[in-house]
């Protein structure tokens, strides 16, 4: 009896070490892969991408990123009220700083590709994703839940674009800068910091919050897939 129960304790400890997010990534591997190995980003990686698709994505993503800024600000506010670790604020703040660079980069990139950012009409998938963000900004949404969404949103881009830079990829020269933006090592480390924060929060959170965060994580993945799908060119 005693041996058995200590074995179970050992197992629980192991799961805790692995972390809530790692457990989700295993459990939802296929959905995660659907978002991070989408035909659009795979076409960038293998060099077959249609530049019209890329331009469409660029214009839509600029709109998304503008909406993402107040969402990240709302996570910062939650962290300042609910976090027990002051370094969370610094990580989130560094994310906001990189969004500042990102907006400038979108403007530069759009002009390089001849995309007029002022005339981009947000598509349904984008509007839906932005209203999902809007709901997560509510003061009623708890810090661990919002932090999970924040991590997942950044992680999908990091994994997707890092894959376009791996050995064997044939990403066109003109698109390498885009892939670098989210696929670089620094961005990878930043995503890991976000994951660590989310994990720490989730480990202390009650079960109902962890379930809520898991649902939000899955919704992020669905929105990301829909977002990539937008780059498809309709006849
Ligand atoms: C749709 C989307 N998801 C994630 C990111 C990463 O910031 C982005 N720029 N756009």
Image: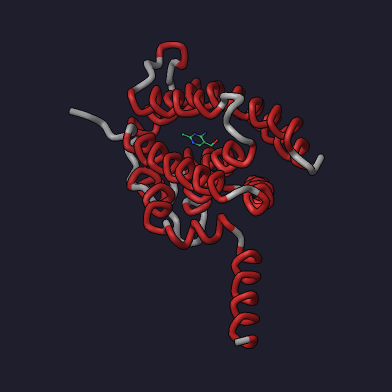
**As drawn, is 180 to the left or to the right of 53?**
right
x and y, in percent, of residue 165 in the image = 51, 52
**On-image quarter of the N terminus:** bottom right
x and y, in percent, of residue 91 in the image = 73, 40
Which residue extends farthest front?
1
In this picture, is 10 found above or below 3? above
Which residue extends farthest top?
118
Question: What residue is shown at x 45% (from left), y 40% (from top)?
Answer: 220
x and y, in percent, of residue 106 in the image = 54, 26
In this orientation, which residue lies closer to the viewer: 127 or 103? 127
**As drawn, is 45 to the left or to the right of 10?**
left
**As drawn, is 47 to the left or to the right of 191?**
left
Which residue extends farthest left?
235
Question: What residue is shown at x 61% (from left), y 35% (from top)?
Answer: 142
Question: What residue is shown at x 56% (from left), y 50% (from top)?
Answer: 207
> Do we see residue 98 in this rendering?
yes
x and y, in percent, of residue 135 in the image = 50, 25
In this orientation, which residue lies closer to the viewer: 127 or 10? 10
Which residue extends farthest right?
86
**On-image quarter of the C terminus:** top left
> Do we see residue 180 in this rendering?
no
In this orientation, which residue lies closer to the viewer: 177 or 133? 133
């Amino acid at each position: 009896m005693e041996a058995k129960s200590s074995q179970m304790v050992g197992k629980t400890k192991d799961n805790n070490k692995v972390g809530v997010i790692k457990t989700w990534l295993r459990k939802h591997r296929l959905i995660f892969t659907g978002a991070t190995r989408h035909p659009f980003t795979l076409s960038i990686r293998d060099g077959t991408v249609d530049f019209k698709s890329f331009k469409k994505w660029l214009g839509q993503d600029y709109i998304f990123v503008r909406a993402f800024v107040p969402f990240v600000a709302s996570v910062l506010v939650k962290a300042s009220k609910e976090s027990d670790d002051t370094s969370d604020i610094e990580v989130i703040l560094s994310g906001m700083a990189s969004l500042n660079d990102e907006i400038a980069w979108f403007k530069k990139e759009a002009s390089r590709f001849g995309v007029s950012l002022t005339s981009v009409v947000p598509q349904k998938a984008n509007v839906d994703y932005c209203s999902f963000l809007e709901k997560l900004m509510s003061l009623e949404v708890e810090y661990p839940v919002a932090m999970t969404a924040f991590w997942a949103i950044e992680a999908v881009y990091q994994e997707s674009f890092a894959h376009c830079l791996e050995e064997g990829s044939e990403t066109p020269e003109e698109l390498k800068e885009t892939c670098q933006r989210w696929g670089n090592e620094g961005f990878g480390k930043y995503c890991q910091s976000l994951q660590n924060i989310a994990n720490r929060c989730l480990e202390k959170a009650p079960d109902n919050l962890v379930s809520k965060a898991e649902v939000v994580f899955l919704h992020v993945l669905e929105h990301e897939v829909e977002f990539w799908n937008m780059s498809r060119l309709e006849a």
